[in-house]
Structure formats: structure tokens, C-alpha cells
């Protein structure tokens, strides 16, 4: 079987293969940063780190290219750590197990980290080369992009010198992005008390799984199921019918991923066990019917367990069920300016108990219109406040307003036509990119974003299409060769 390092372009895949062995989950990027610093030292390249941990490696221009504008290749050092429930993998120490299948590189039961490991690999291949033509070059590796854009938020004026930024974090070859949505998180914290449960009540664990999940920006419009919404819909209805009690609830992992799995431990009053089983079976069939086209692998199970000693108070339980039922999830509005672009959305991302008497719900809002982003975040805050939670907003970042007059955009369109004899698709994206934050600190930057084709980002089904990496690489090399001249 062909190895990843034997694929073309070999220099890019060789670095990607190395990166797969380095743990780099968000907020734990120490090992990948150390690897990158070691790389800079090996090739005798200048490097520096800022106060938040971003790393910049610089390389002088090749002969004859000194008159070009400085170019910054930008990628993020971290990755989302998601896995199937039955997979044993420690993202803090285990390497990613990658394999090839049907023209794609995939991982065994976990996220692959092509988002944005392939951007890192391409940057390293350029830095290591003695033959690639380029002007003054900087490679920026930001930290913690996936869980809050901490690196981009902390980037300070003066750290970068280049005037053109190529963001290598897009996921559709043939598309050149010139704008993105801004985003923020709304986090609700509930405090609750518990009561002792009589031993003649029966305990049942309900699990939802088999969902596709997906990137909460790129794929929010595709109608994928949300495990928390499905689970709570069952709990809400079961409570109405059988007056169940809730002992435990958990679902979702990453703020920027549509949750794939969720579970709850509930208690059923004496004499209701068979009735709730019958209702459960009918409920599962209803959901399967609703999600037949988008979620063919959906599963929902119910298993009897030993009875816990405590459950949440009924008054709190009902407020929680109502809050989750009323919580918006999905597309809020479509753009009136750009056909087919989601303008505003909200993702019910996770729910977890953070102590014996505390429960946290994380939601994320995105919009290409700043006022609309604020509006949906305020609506989420109002909902959870009404239900008795304390609310905070965090992780806010601005959108990137498209500039159709961009010089680097015009160069990129020309290059793409020359290389591939077809027009690139120039567009904005509903996902968040760090570009909007860069513009706040460096308002004169000229930017585009591009990359190879990656599907299933932020899920264990993440995969990168092999043949698009070669096109991505050729396009990147020509962008460096034809970088605009300084004026």
C-alpha cells in the first residue's frame, strides 16, 4: 500500500506525516510549537514568539525577488480533538492514525487535523526549499484558533512586516475566500439542587449517536441532526407524559462542532417502565423518518441501569428542558447580498455538568453582519436569563468584509486561470477565519484564503482529498512567484 510520504507533492506530505505524530489539541500546542522552533533552528531561519504564543518564522527573499511585497503564509497550530465514543485515543499524547481510502486521507475514529495541519505542512515545505521563488516571506503559526482564536486576538501591531497575507485555512479547492463571518459564544451556567430518589424508581440511560456532526460554520445549513436537541426533545416529552426525573445529562464537545453524541440518565416512576419503552420506540422512528436523508446512521438507545441516589429538583429540571427546547439551533437568516451564503446562525454546541450543583450550556453564534451577530447572541442570553441561568459572552471575533478591489485577489484569479484553465469561485464563507482579527491590528493587509478540499472538519469523519493538495500547492507556489511588487 502506498505511504502518505510517497504522495505528491512529496515535500508537503512528508511534513504532514510528521505533524500527525505531534499532539496539538487546542490550548495544548506546546509540542507543535517546539517542533516548529526546532525546524527554524535546523534551517537557520529567524523566528520569534509573542506573548500569547504565536510563532513567526521568517525567510529572506530569493535572488531577484527583493522588490516584491512581503508575503505572510498563515495557518493555525492547533486542531479539534473529536473521536467516536468507542475509540481509545488520548489527544494529549497519542499520534493520529491516518490511512488512505478512495482518494482521501482519513483518520481511524478521530479527527485528522488536516484543518490546519496541511497549511502548516505547506508553509514548512516553502521554508525548507532552496528552489521556490518568493519575496520576503513570513510564516505565522497562530495558537488556539479552534477554541477561541486566542492567538489572533492577542496578536499585536508590529509583530508582522508583510503586506500580503495568504490564509491557508480554507477547505474547498477551487474557491478563493475574501470574507468570513464573525462570531461569539454565549455560555449559560445553571445552579441546581438535588433530591434523594426512592429506591423503587427505575434508572434508564438514553444515548443518541451516529450523527454526522460537522463544522458549525461550513455545515450548519445542511440539516444535520443535533444530538442535544434530539435527546432533550425526548426528555421534554417523556417528562410531560411520565414525570421522569433527570440525574445526569451530557452532550457535545467542541464549541464549533455540531454535537454528534449525547446521553442522559433518567429515573422513571414505578409502573411506567414499559410505557416509556413503548413511547421511546415510537419516538426513535419519528426521528429516523425526519432525518432519513441527512442522518442515515442515526442511533438512539435506552438501557436500564442501577438507580442513582439523587436527581435534580423537578422545578429546575423543567426549566432546563424548556430552555434546551426553545434554544435556537441552525440557520437564522440567509444573506440578501450573496446568494446561498448563510448570514446568521447559532449552534447549540454542548451541555455538561461542571460540579455537583452546576451545569453549563455552550452555544456559538456567527454572522457576516456585526449587528445581527450581536442580536442573536443577545437573544440567546435573554432566553437563558429567563430560565434562571447566569450568562456570559466570550470568544468574540469580527467578520472579514469582502474587498472585491483587492490587488492580491486579482492576481490570484489570473493565476488560477493560467494554471487550471477555469475560473475560481470567489466567495465569502460562513465559518470564522482569523483574517478579520488580523485586519483590526493590520488594516492595510491585502488578504485571501484558500486550501485543498477537506470534508467533515471537526468530526471523526474529517478527510482530505489527495489530488486537491497538489493543486493547492501549485497555486501557492505561483502566488509566491507572482506576488505584487512594492510601490
Image (spheres, rainbow, N blue to C red):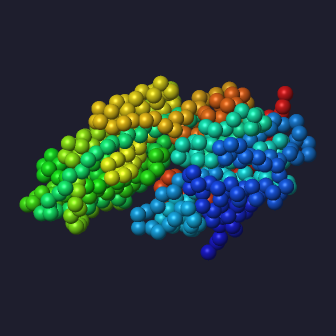
Residue 286 sits above or below residue 183 on the image: below
User: In the current view of this chain or complex, which residue is farthest to the right?
Assistant: 63
Q: Position of residue 224 (x, y in %)?
A: 38, 49
Residue 242 lies left or right of residue 13; in this view the side is left
**The C terminus: image quadrant:** top right
User: In the current view of this chain or complex, which residue is farthest to the left?
Assistant: 271
**The N terminus: image quadrant:** bottom right
Residue at x 41% of width, y 43% of height: 362
Q: Position of residue 288 (x, y in %)?
A: 27, 55
Residue at x 56% of width, y 62% of height: 92
Q: Quadrant of residue 281?
A: bottom left
Q: Quadrant of residue 117?
A: bottom right
Residue 217 lies left or right of residue 21; in this view the side is left
Residue 452 sits above or below residue 335 on the image: below
Q: Position of residue 337 (x, y in %)?
A: 50, 26
Question: Does residue 174 appear anywhere in the picture?
Answer: no
Residue 149 lies left or right of residue 37; in this view the side is left
Q: Nearer the viewer, residue 454 or 388?
A: 388
Q: Nearer the viewer, residue 280 or 142?
A: 142
Residue at x 41% of width, y 40% of height: 187
Residue 106 sits above or below residue 174 on the image: below
User: In the current view of this chain or complex, which residue is farthest to the top?
Assistant: 371
Residue 436 sits above or below residue 189 on the image: above
Q: Quadrant of residue 84?
A: bottom left
Q: Position of residue 377 (x, y in %)?
A: 42, 32
Question: Does residue 375 appear anywhere in the picture?
Answer: yes
Residue at x 59% of width, y 42% of height: 150
Amino acid at each position: 500500500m502506498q505511504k502518505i510520504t510517497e504522495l505528491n507533492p512529496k515535500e508537503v506530505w512528508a511534513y504532514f506525516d510528521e505533524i500527525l505524530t505531534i499532539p496539538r489539541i487546542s490550548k495544548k500546542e506546546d509540542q507543535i510549537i517546539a517542533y516548529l522552533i526546532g525546524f527554524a533552528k535546523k534551517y537557520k531561519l529567524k523566528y520569534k514568539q509573542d506573548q500569547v504564543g504565536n510563532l513567526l518564522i521568517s525567510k529572506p527573499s530569493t535572488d531577484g525577488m527583493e522588490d516584491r511585497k512581503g508575503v505572510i503564509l498563515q495557518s493555525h497550530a492547533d486542531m479539534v480533538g473529536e473521536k467516536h465514543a468507542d475509540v481509545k485515543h488520548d489527544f494529549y499524547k497519542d499520534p493520529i492514525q491516518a490511512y488512505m481510502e478512495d482518494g482521501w486521507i482519513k483518520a481511524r475514529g478521530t479527527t485528522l487535523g488536516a484543518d490546519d495541519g496541511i497549511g502548516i505542512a505547506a508553509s514548512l515545505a516553502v521554508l525548507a526549499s532552496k528552489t521556490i521563488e518568493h519575496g520576503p516571506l513570513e510564516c505565522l503559526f497562530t495558537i488556539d484558533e479552534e477554541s477561541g482564536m486566542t492567538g489572533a486576538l492577542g496578536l499585536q501591531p508590529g509583530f508582522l512586516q508583510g503586506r500580503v497575507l495568504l490564509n491557508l485555512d480554507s477547505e474547498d479547492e477551487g474557491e478563493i475566500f475574501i470574507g468570513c463571518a464573525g462570531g461569539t459564544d454565549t455560555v449559560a451556567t445553571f445552579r441546581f439542587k438535588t433530591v434523594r430518589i426512592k429506591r423503587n424508581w427505575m434508572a434508564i440511560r438514553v444515548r443518541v449517536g451516529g450523527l454526522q456532526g460537522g463544522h458549525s460554520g461550513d455545515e450548519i445549513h445542511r440539516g444535520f441532526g443535533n444530538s442535544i436537541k434530539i435527546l432533550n426533545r425526548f426528555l421534554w416529552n417523556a417528562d410531560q407524559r411520565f414525570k421522569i426525573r433527570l440525574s445526569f445529562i451530557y452532550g457535545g464537545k467542541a464549541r464549533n462542532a455540531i454535537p454528534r453524541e449525547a446521553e442522559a440518565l433518567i429515573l422513571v416512576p414505578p409502573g411506567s417502565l414499559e410505557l416509556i419503552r413503548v413511547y421511546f420506540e415510537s419516538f426513535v422512528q419519528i426521528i429516523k423518518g425526519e432525518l432519513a436523508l441527512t442522518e442515515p446512521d442515526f442511533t438512539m438507545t435506552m438501557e436500564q441501569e442501577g438507580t442513582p441516589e439523587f436527581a435534580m429538583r423537578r422545578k429546575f429540571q423543567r426549566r432546563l428542558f424548556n430552555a434546551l427546547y426553545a434554544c435556537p439551533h441552525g440557520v437564522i437568516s440567509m444573506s440578501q447580498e450573496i446568494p446561498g451564503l448563510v448570514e446568521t446562525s447559532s449552534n447549540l454546541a454542548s451541555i455538561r455538568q461542571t460540579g455537583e450543583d452546576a451545569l453549563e450550556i455552550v452555544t456559538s453564534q456567527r454572522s457576516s453582519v456585526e449587528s445581527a451577530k450581536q442580536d442573536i447572541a443577545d437573544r440567546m442570553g435573554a432566553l437563558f436569563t429567563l430560565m434562571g441561568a447566569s450568562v456570559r459572552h466570550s470568544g468574540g471575533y469580527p467578520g472579514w468584509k469582502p474587498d472585491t478591489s483587492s490587488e492580491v485577489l486579482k492576481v490570484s484569479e489570473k493565476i488560477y486561470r493560467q494554471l487550471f484553465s477555469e475560473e475560481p469561485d470567489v466567495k465569502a464563507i460562513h465559518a470564522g477565519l482569523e483574517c478579520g482579527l488580523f485586519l483590526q491590528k493590520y488594516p492595510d493587509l491585502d488578504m485571501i484564503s484558500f486550501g485543498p478540499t477537506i470534508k467533515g472538519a471537526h468530526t471523526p469523519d474529517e478527510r482530505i482529498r489527495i489530488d486537491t493538495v497538489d493543486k493547492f500547492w501549485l497555486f501557492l507556489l505561483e502566488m509566491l512567484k507572482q506576488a505584487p511588487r512594492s510601490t
